[in-house]
Amino acid sequence: MLDTSRARKPTCQEDLEFALVQMKSETLNKVNDALVRLESGNYGNCFDCGEEIAEKRLRALPFAVRCKIARRPRRPPSSASVSSPPGAARARSS
């Protein structure tokens, strides 16, 4: 029986090595997915808008699934962008 009270904690080096292995695995999965898209004729098309992903982007990131425009984070509208009647800001500051 394993004594869990004496189990050692992973070292920083082991944590780093695990993270690198995990990143390599995720990248390999993305490359494999890109190969499937290539075989099916869908490679290079944006998942969001369907437009072609720029060749320059695909050269830099061959497994890209979104074009440069679609990958931009969408921000929720801020309270400042809510329409106020003209002059409302001046009326409050007076």
Image: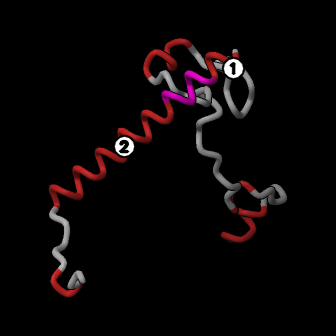
Asked whether 8 or 82 is in front, the reply is 8
Say left or right for 49 vs 33.
right
Q: Quadrant of residue 49?
A: top right
Badge 1 amino acid: Asn
Residue at horizontal 19 percent and vertical 66 percent from the top: 10
- The picture places residue 1, in percent across and down from the top left corner, at 24, 83
Asked whether 89 or 72 is in front, the reply is 72
Asked whether 28 or 45 is in front, the reply is 28
- The picture places residue 45, in percent across and down from the top left corner, at 67, 21
The crowding category of the residue bearing disc 1, from other C-alpha atoms within 10 Å (few below 14, some 14 to 19, many at least 20), is: some
* Residue farthest right in this picture: 85
Q: Are marks 1 and 2 in contact (CB under 8 Å)?
A: no
- The picture places residue 32, in percent across and down from the top left corner, at 52, 28
Vertically, is 61 above or below 70?
above
Say left or right for 26 vs 65.
left
Vertically, is 40 above or below 66?
above
Give the Cα distance between marks 1 and 2. Answer: 25 Å
Q: Secondary structure at mark 1?
A: loop
Residue at horizontal 64 percent and vertical 51 percent from the top: 75
Q: Earlier in the sequence, mark 1 or mark 2?
A: 2
Predominant SS along the magenta part: helix
Q: Which residue is mark 2?
A: 23
Asked whether 69 or 81 is in front, the reply is 69
> Magenta span covers which residues?
31-36
Say left or right for 42 vs 33.
right
Residue at horizontal 56 percent and vertical 25 percent from the top: 34
Picture disc at residue 42: 1
* Residue farthest top in this picture: 55
Viewport quadrant of the C terminus: bottom right
Picture disc at residue 62: none
Badge 2 amino acid: Met
